[in-house]
Amino acid sequence: MAKTTQMPNVAPLKSGFMLTSIVGFLISAIYMFPRTPSWGFTFAIFFAAMFVASMISMTYGPEEAMLHVGHIRERKKK
């Protein structure tokens, strides 16, 4: 029997969080870094950390939280 390990206290994050991190990183790397390297690097590191947090949340997050996401949308449609 395979054992799955879960990290305790991992909050489920929304998909908009991951999208914001990707777009923010691209804008910082392409637009900000050539103009002001210190701010561009700082923002790139910040958005990269956001992306890592969203990946950890997606990988180790509680499965029960993801089951309820679809039910909330179905209730709002009615």
Image (spheres, grey):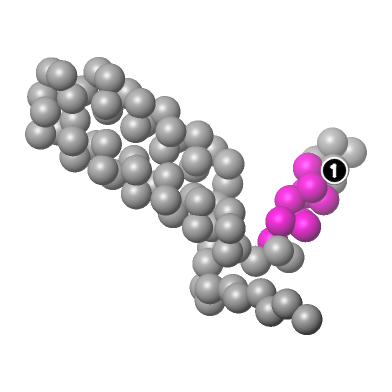
Residue at 39% across / 47% down in the picture? Answer: 50
Label the magenta part by its dominant secondary structure.
Answer: helix
Q: Quick one: 9 or 2, which is closer to the camera?
A: 2
Q: Residue at x 27, y 20 (%)?
A: 30
Give coordinates of residue 18: x percent, y percent. Answer: 50, 41
Q: Residue furthest front?
A: 1
- Which of the 4 image quarters holds residue 64? bottom right
Relative to 52, residue 20 above or below: above
Q: Is residue 49 magenta?
A: no
Q: From the viewer's perspective, is residue 75 above or below residue 68?
A: above
Q: Which residue is identified by label 1?
A: 74
- Number of residues whose C-alpha sits closer than 10 Å to that of mark 1, classed few (under 14), some (14–19) or many (20 or more): few
Left or right: residue 47 compared with residue 52: left
Q: Where is 42 relative to 13, above or below? A: above
Q: Which image quadrant for residue 42?
A: top left
Q: Could you tell me which secondary element the residue under label 1 belongs to?
A: helix
- Point out residue 12 in the picture as x, y percentages from the top left corner: 58, 58
Residue 10 percent coordinates (x, y): 53, 67
Q: What's the residue type where badge 1 is placed?
A: Glu
Would you say residue 12 is visible in this rendering?
no
In the rendered image, which quarter contains the C terminus?
top right
Q: Is 38 left, or right, of 64 in this rendering?
A: left
Q: Which residues are magenta?
A: 65-73
> Which quadrant of the view contains residue 40?
top left
Q: Residue at x 24, y 37 (%)?
A: 43
Can you see residue 63?
yes
Q: Quadrant of the N terminus?
A: bottom right
> Is residue 31 rendered to the left or right of residue 78?
left
Instruction: Please provide percent x and percent y for residue 57.
Output: 54, 57
